[in-house]
Image: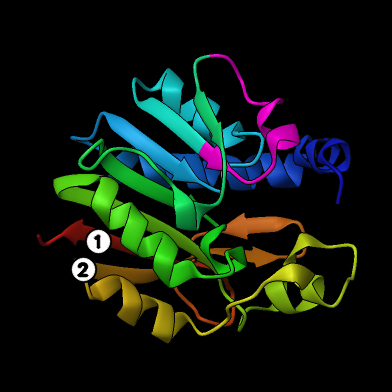
Amino acid sequence: MSVEKYLESCRKVFWQNIFRFELDYLVSRLQGSRDVLSVGCGPAIIEGELSKHGFRVTGLDISQEALNCAPDGIRTFAGKAEDMSFPASSFDAVIYVASLQFIEDYRKALERSTAVLRPGGKIIVMLLNPTSDFFKKRSIDPGSYMSMIRHKDLDQIERDIAEHYTVRAEYMLGVEDEKIFESNDPFEAALYSVVGEKRF
């Protein structure tokens, strides 16, 4: 999907509602953080809103074309998550908004994320839930970005995150047709969120 088509779809009310839900979730869980790195941020739609809440946001994405569409006030860097070269202890929080599962070597990306986090820093990983009807319907469409997902084992991803973090996880964001609602039902919830605090 081209950046233009992605941005066009993002303007739809349905996706605006999802972004608002994700933004509220992030704001509530990023309290106490200031410097935030968003990995796989794309055109940084949610990140732009986070900056309005007082967070200093840095966006990393493999696509310079997508980053060119990022709002003012977001520091952006083009590059692979596995090779991020920020200095150690640069950020209070690292977030992955439905991006980790598309990264080829996500374990290496998690290692790099841990290195750039300050002691006690937070990681928030929003994962697409392959069990949900929302995912199943969209992943069979070859034009959907969900068809390009690489990693579907949520339990394994959570275990990998837990190697470096004290974690809590939950299903969230129920989707039915064009409606969204709170849900922790694995078959309704489009997202599974893992929130971790760096142990060392």
Which residue is denoted by mark 1 in the rendering? 196
Residue drawn at x 25%, y 35% is 90
Residue 30 in view (yes/no): no
- Please state the extent of the stretch shown in magenta in the rendering: 60-72
Residue 68 lies within the magenta run:
yes
Note whether 148 is above or below 23 in the view shown.
Answer: below
Residue 145 screen position, x and y as percent:
77, 61
Q: Residue furthest top?
A: 72
Residue 76 screen position, x and y as percent:
53, 28
Note whether 92 is above or below 168 in the view shown.
Answer: above
Q: Nearer the viewer, residue 102 or 129?
A: 102
Residue drawn at x 63%, y 78% is 132
Residue drawn at x 37%, y 63% is 110
Q: Residues within 10 Å of mark 2 (few under 14, many from 20)?
A: some
Q: Upstream in the sequence, badge 1 or badge 2?
A: 2
Residue 135 lies within the magenta run:
no
Q: Specify the quadrant of the image occupied by residue 142.
A: bottom right
Q: Quadrant of the C terminus?
A: bottom left
Residue 26 screen position, x and y as percent:
39, 44
Q: Amino acid at mark 1?
A: Gly
Q: Which mark is residue 164?
A: 2
Q: Which mark is residue 18?
A: none
Mark 1: secondary structure: strand
Residue 189 in view (yes/no): yes
Q: Is residue 169 left or right of residue 180?
A: left
Q: Residues within 10 Å of mark 1 (few under 14, many from 20)?
A: many
- Do the numbered discs 1 and 2 sit on residues whose CB atoms are within 8 Å? yes
Q: Nearer the viewer, residue 162 or 182?
A: 162
Residue 79 screen position, x and y as percent:
57, 44
